[in-house]
Amino acid sequence: MARYKDAVCRLCRREGIKLYLKGERCYSEKCGITKKSAPPGQHGLSRRKLSNFGIQLREKQKTKRHYGILESQFRKYFEMADKQSGITGDNLLRILETRLDNVVYRLGFAESRPQARQMVVHGHFQVNGRKVDIPSYLVKAGDVISVKQRSKKIERLKSLAENFNGTVLNWLSADIEKLEGKIVMLPSRENVDLPIEEHLIIELYSRQ
């Protein structure tokens, strides 16, 4: 699958907000959007008023970049959400939140979603005792996510365990000593703390 390989700080500047794609760097003075907030490109300073379509498109792009997903997969998630009962926007966010790479990040086992994705791909995590190396794997309520025994010696994970602040979102539980987490329940809209206006995304796809 193709991935974005350019400087990720450009993505934050393009959306005008921090997407927290580089872990601790995003909280420091080295953050790209802190140093230069204008959108990338020679015309970055000339901000034009967006049309309704432009506003909807930017919201979709921002959400895709938060979770590190490309268009084909994002549209697939929209179609899944649209077929489920309930509010399509809420369903979409729940699907995005229950991706394995996002859950690893939410549990505090990685400093950013890109780092979590890399660690999943490298096979460091298990779901219910079985190795899963697919970042897009969707977890379910009751699933247990754990670090493989051999991977517990990795310095990065040991450091994260030592600096863990003891708090995760209320739809998750974490045992940092065991490097293990559990999906207590599926997340609701109130559990998603990202600045996303999902109704704009639904409106965009509905008009296509």
Image (cartoon, rainbow, N blue to C red):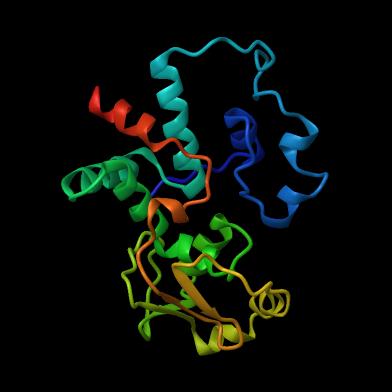
Q: Is residue 109 left or right of residue 64?
A: right
Q: Where on the picture, by quarter, is residue 133?
A: bottom left
Q: Residue at x 61, y 49 (%)?
A: 21
Residue at the outermost front position? 190
Q: Position of residue 79 (x, y in %)?
A: 22, 43
Instruction: Report the number of discs.
Output: 0
Quarter of the figure that contains the C terminus: top left
Query: In the displayed structure, does residue 96 sit left or right of residue 119?
Result: left
Image spot of residue 199 (x, y percent): 36, 33
Left or right, 26 with respect to 67, comes to right
Q: Is residue 100 above or below residue 14?
A: below
Residue at (68, 81) in percent of width and height = 158
Horizontal and vertical percent for residue 103? 46, 65
**Measuring 80% from the left and 49% from the top, which residue is drawn there?**
28
* Place of residue 67 in the rendered image (x, y in percent of width and height, measured from the top left): 47, 49
Quarter occupied by residue 128: bottom left
Q: Residue at x 64, y 77 (%)?
A: 157
**94 relative to 73, above or below:** below
